[in-house]
Amino acid sequence: MMPTGFFCLLLITGGSTFNYSEQPELQAQPDSNQDSDEDVVDSEGNCSYQDVLNHLKLTRSTELYSMTRPVKHHKSATQVHLQMAIYGILDVREIDQTFVLYVWIYMSWGNDHIRWNQHKFCGLKHVVVPTEALWKPDLTIEEMTEKDKAPPSPYLTVTYHGLIELRNDLMLVSTCRMQVYKFPFDIQSCNLSFKSAVYSDDEIKFAAILNASKFTEWSREVMRIQYEWLFLNVTVHEKTVNNLSFNQSMIVYTITMKRRSVLYIANFLLPIMFFLGLDLASFLISDSGGEKLGFK
């Protein structure tokens, strides 16, 4: 009777006390939630920078994007927007007729081969890629006499609608025709002419972003070093020049600066005026006194 009653008690209470077969399902619950989160992320689409690059098929070895001008029709001109800011006037060499500037350059242009829908990539609007991966305008400065010593920027910014942006710092040593006959009260104006090295104006057209007044105000705000020269203003104008067999688009920045004359007045002009006054005072001394020669 006892074994029979115990067996009946197990049958009655076994399903209501503890079921070991359900324990693995409880332990696996966190894993199932994690899998569902991953499914949600995947369902949102491609959300990484690499997904955009894979969509564009953009790699360092993709010569299609770096070898030629990025237009769908060869007669379409590439609009290059240029903006320059002067960080500092480092030196002005009157003997060599050169001056040294440290400037910041911003360029932007369109690439007809690069587009993506930002909504399909979780709202990703831009990616940063190495400069070797894409074509860049061959920007040159006519007045530049020495190679730029500042390291070039290693990256470009690519936006979803095909706009390419380049930011770079340059230390420029360029020629400048100076008039020093008014020293030390002289005012000098020097030009920086930006253009393409090989492309004509039918292929590349440069356009300045800021006008002269805004550019002057902005340069005064960002300028850090002026040395002995005081920055006055900058004028900007676009023009087309003839380069032997074809025309080229050009942007010319004219930088006007004034020499700080206080130092030269204190160290140069005042001593000269003092000795000139002494020399004139010597004429008031009588010749018979014998002190004129000793005074002079």
Image (tube, rainbow, N blue to C red):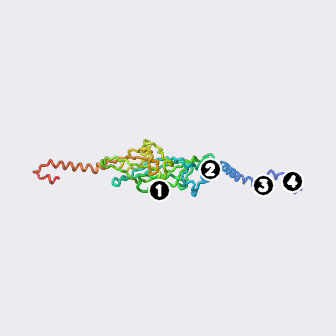
Mark sitting earlier along the chain (3/2) = 3
**Of the residues under marks 3 and 1, which one precedes in the sequence?**
3
Give residue 55's position: percent from left, percent from top: 62, 52
Relative to residue 114, is residue 25 drawn left or right?
Answer: right
Q: Which label's residue is closer to the chain start, 1 or 2?
A: 2
The nearer-to-camera label among 1 and 2 is 1
Estimate the spatial distance between the alpha carbons at disc 4 and disc 3, rounded to whole Å.
Answer: 21 Å
Q: Nearer the viewer, mark 4 or mark 2?
A: 2
| Mark in the foreground, 1 or 4 | 1
Other residues around mark 3 within 10 Å, as few (<14) / some (14–19) / many (≥20):
few
Which image quadrant for residue 66? bottom right
Q: What residue is drawn where x is 15% and y is 54%?
A: 294
Q: Kindly identify which numbered label has been placed on residue 151.
A: 1
Q: Can you identify the residue that label 3 sits on? A: 21
Which amino acid, mark 1?
A: Pro
The residue under label 4 is which amino acid type?
Cys
- For label 4, the residue is 8
Q: Are marks 4 and 3 in contact (CB under 8 Å)?
A: no
Please name which of the two marks, 3 or 1, marks the residue nearer to the observer.
1
Q: Which labelled disc corresponds to residue 249?
A: none
Q: Which mark is residue 47?
A: 2
Tag 3: amino acid: Ser
